[in-house]
Image (cartoon, grey):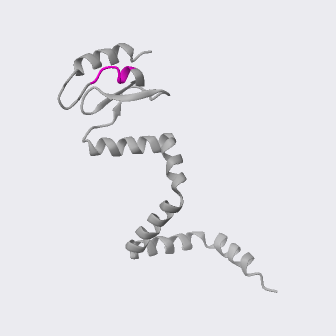
Amino acid sequence: MFDRKAYMEQYHKNNREEILRRHKQWAKDNPEKMKEYKEQWRENNPEHNRQWFKTDKGRIAQQKYNLNRRELGLNPLNKYFEGSEGHHINKNDIVYILKELHRSISHCLNTGRNMEKINRLAMENIGE
């Protein structure tokens, strides 16, 4: 007797590149349907996005999105560490400092309010 499931599994293994090419072409030819499909998938899998944003790659992607929206650059001068937040010392450069330290002085890069104080504090604590 013919085993359709086994046949299809073998077909997919043998023709993987061709199948991927057809899927990509379909997605290009049907952008509205693809958009609808992706939206539906996101609705049905909300936990996937939450988990992705907890990874380093997801956190950095979200950070870049927010910085582009605010017209700020992402040039880290030191490495991210657990419990830190990025502090912009200017429009492009970021230093990672302790979250408590960053929030200890209210400041604003756009107006310049308290930037001198927080930058001095950040540079003193950057090596810790």
Q: Is residue 68 left or right of residue 18?
A: left
Q: What residue is rendered at 24% in x and 41% in y?
A: 71
Residue 123, placed above or below residue 50? above
Displayed quadrant of residue 112: top left
Outermost residue toward the bottom in this view = 1
Q: What residue is rendered at 47% in x and 26% in y?
A: 83
Q: What residue is rendered at 30% in x and 20% in y?
A: 105
Which quadrant is the N terminus positioned in?
A: bottom right
Q: What residue is rendered at 39% in x and 18% in y?
A: 126
Q: Position of residue 111 (x, y in %)?
A: 17, 29
Camera-side residue of 85 and 77: 85
Outermost residue toward the right in this view = 1
Which quadrant is the C terminus positioned in?
A: top left
Displayed quadrant of residue 4: bottom right
Question: What's the magenta region?
Answer: 101-106
Q: Is residue 41 left or right of residue 116?
A: right
Q: Position of residue 96 (x, y in %)?
A: 39, 26
Q: Is residue 104 left or right of residue 2?
A: left
